[in-house]
Amino acid sequence: MRFSLGQELRQVQKQILAPRMIQSMEILQLPLQRLEERIQQEMVENPFLELRADPSDAEEDLDTGREEEPRVEVRSDLEKELVIDESSSEEFERLETLTEENPEVFEDDISRPSSNRMEELSERYNDMMANVPSHEPTLQDHLIEQLAGLDISPQVREMAELLIYSLDHDGYLKTDLRDLLGPDATEEDLKAAQAALAVVQQMDPAGVGAATLKECLLLQLHEDLPHHEELAILIREHLEDVGENRIPQIAKKRGWTVDFVEELIRELRTLNPKPGAQFGGSSVPNVVPDVYVEETEDGRFVVQLKDDHLSRLGINEDYRRLVESRRSAKQDRDFFRRKLTHAQWLIEAVRQRRNTLRKVAQAIVDHQQRFLRDGPEYIEPLKMQQIADEVGVHVTTVSRAVDDKWIETPRGIFPLKRFFRSGTVAQDGQEIAWDKVRSMLQEIVAAEDKQNPLTDEDLVGELARRGVNVNRRTITKYRQELGIPSSRQRKDWRPAAK
């Protein structure tokens, strides 16, 4: 191996994203609700941004071709319209040049505004906070409220609070009491924890505070339930048999009839295996569609955006004049110049997001007309690359445009990603989406003889008779994804009616 010191000239190719290009990509990827929050926050921080009554006024802020009075060092390359498209190398180069030549414009450290401006920002912030949705009560909120009305000792109350905040989302206490209390806990602490657990397990909803499914179901039994004693036996000794549909074995072992066992199972299914799941505090966000679909008179489906109000985002003319005024101090002009440029970047990014999202959503809808007209079983196989080629953007732009976005259709509300589906080739040579195969599978199972349910191998044969060739492993996978039990679990053990 040879080492040497010296100079070497090498040519390498790098792609560096300008800061504002990165922000534009982020704007494109944001769903409507988060975009509105982002704009509200920007309006709080930036005096140049406002929502106008006339949408055409906002468009004029980005019209670079109109003749106006001379501006003070603002109308330059910085205000040229930006095309937010990763495939445009020219835009990347211009953005990188702007960043290097105007570092003060993209500096995040901005001078502190005046007291009057701070008061205006405070009013905007209060308006924004007034629109924040109220907090949905969690399971812990519900239990703590009940705990406040109980006459118990301070030590048991403290332990009960600890247990309540240790419950998982479904209302289970999966941690052992000794582990929860720690190694320094005394026997007195353990007794207080056991008393607190008994208190929690008596609270609403019934079944909360259990360690296992079996305990959760037993906590929900009460004397008003029909056959509650037999139900307790079924839960304690035959819960696994119930899951595996071993009804004849249960009946034989307990000396019950098959009909009675099935009646008990129907009662068992009225109990809640996840008593805490009905409360808020989950990570699932509210769905706010970005686009919706309308059917035209000629039967076509076209998309409309739900963010029309964002087209009114524009520049506050009073603050623009402050930039143009030479009477302002240089420090103030520099502050306003940076803020104006930030505002123009955001307006352009939002406008480009709207254009891109409309084109991508319309291209998707054009491919899925039958889905919208006839139902989910008619979804067409579709890839993101197809949409990218039609719209004329990079496939990553399509990915960002549909990410976490929802569309409201006559068939319901769906994520845009729902319409991208791979498929298989049918016996007639036509490509068929896997969703169609799943739909066929559900139809076959729904129509089967429950006295002799079809095995996975039988389902393979039934699909083959419909022109779709899939292997047994795929059938098993799709059956489990659809929540369809195995053939043994689907079997109806009651004697056939004569």
Image (tube, rainbow, N blue to C red):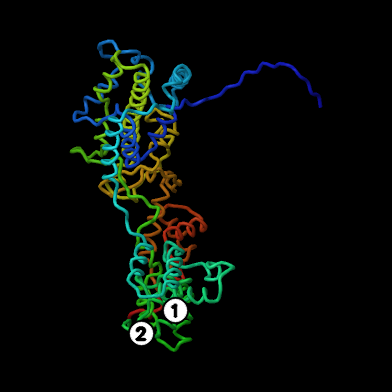
Left or right of 117, for residue 1: right
**Which picture quadrant has residue 220?**
bottom left
Name the residue beneath numbered marker 1: 235
Name the residue beneath numbered marker 2: 227
State the residue at coordinates (36%, 65%): 144
Q: Secondary structure at mark 2?
A: loop
Circle 2 crowding by C-alpha within 10 Å: few under 14, some 14–19, many from 20: some
| Alpha carbon separation for disc pair 2 and 1 | 12 Å
State the residue at coordinates (30%, 48%): 413
Query: On the rendered image, what quadrant is the C terminus found in?
Result: bottom left
Q: Is residue 324 above or below residue 377?
A: above
Query: On the rendered image, what quadrant is the N terminus found in?
Result: top right
Farthest front residue in view: 115
| Closest to the observer, 365 or 148 | 148
**Which picture quadrant has residue 107?**
top left
Farthest right residue in view: 1
